[in-house]
Image (tube, grey):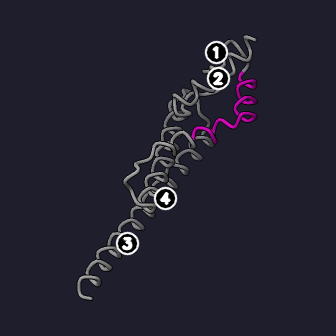
Amino acid sequence: MKKNQDRKNAEKTFLQDRGRITNKEMAKKLGVHPATIARWKKTDEWDVKLIQTISDINDSDTTEEEDSFNTDMRHLNLLNERIEARLQKKELLSSEILELSQAKLNIISCIEILNDQLKYSDIRKIQLRENQEFD
């Protein structure tokens, strides 16, 4: 019974911390092995639940395009926060630092693309409004 409760508490902690807590940290809190946390995380699909939790926080007034943009930005911010949490570890291999820095660069590129798409979309909306006014 305790293990089942530990599993629920671990998932709740993971979701509340937005995925920034490491398996090792959580395992230490609960007194279980980090591999147990990793197994729970994979089996119960915590990452999927985390993304769904973040996606559920929507503004109902936004258009589908703006909503999609906001969801993408939330996901990118979440990934960025998880990278930042990993960078706070005291001991990182140079290969881990390289991978994390490349991931941050990819996130920056994605944000630039999303901003360009939104800008282009806004320009199109203005042009459509102007065309409708002249019709």
Asked whether the beta carbons under mark 3 and mark 1 sit within 8 Å of each other, the answer is no
Which corner quadrant of the image does residue 115 belong to? bottom left
- Farthest-out residue, left: 134
Q: Which mark is residue 76?
A: none
Front residue of 69/129: it is: 129
For the stretch drawn in magenta, the main secondary structure is helix
Q: Which residue is mark 4?
A: 110
Q: Which residues are magenta?
A: 34-51
Q: Which amino acid is tagged 3?
A: Tyr
Q: Secondary structure at mark 2?
A: helix
Q: Which mark is residue 24?
A: 2
Q: Which residue is mark 3?
A: 120
Which label's residue is closer to the chain start, 2 or 4? 2
Q: Secondary structure at mark 3?
A: helix
Asked whether the beta carbons under mark 1 and mark 2 sit within 8 Å of each other, the answer is yes
Classify 94 as above or below 37: below
Asked whether the beta carbons under mark 1 and mark 4 sit within 8 Å of each other, the answer is no
The location of residue 30, given as percent across then percent down, is 65, 14
Marks 1 and 4, how far apart at CA: 35 Å
Q: Which amino acid is tagged 2?
A: Lys
Mark 2: few/some/many CA within 10 Å (<14, 14-19, 20+): some
Q: Which amino acid is tagged 4?
A: Cys
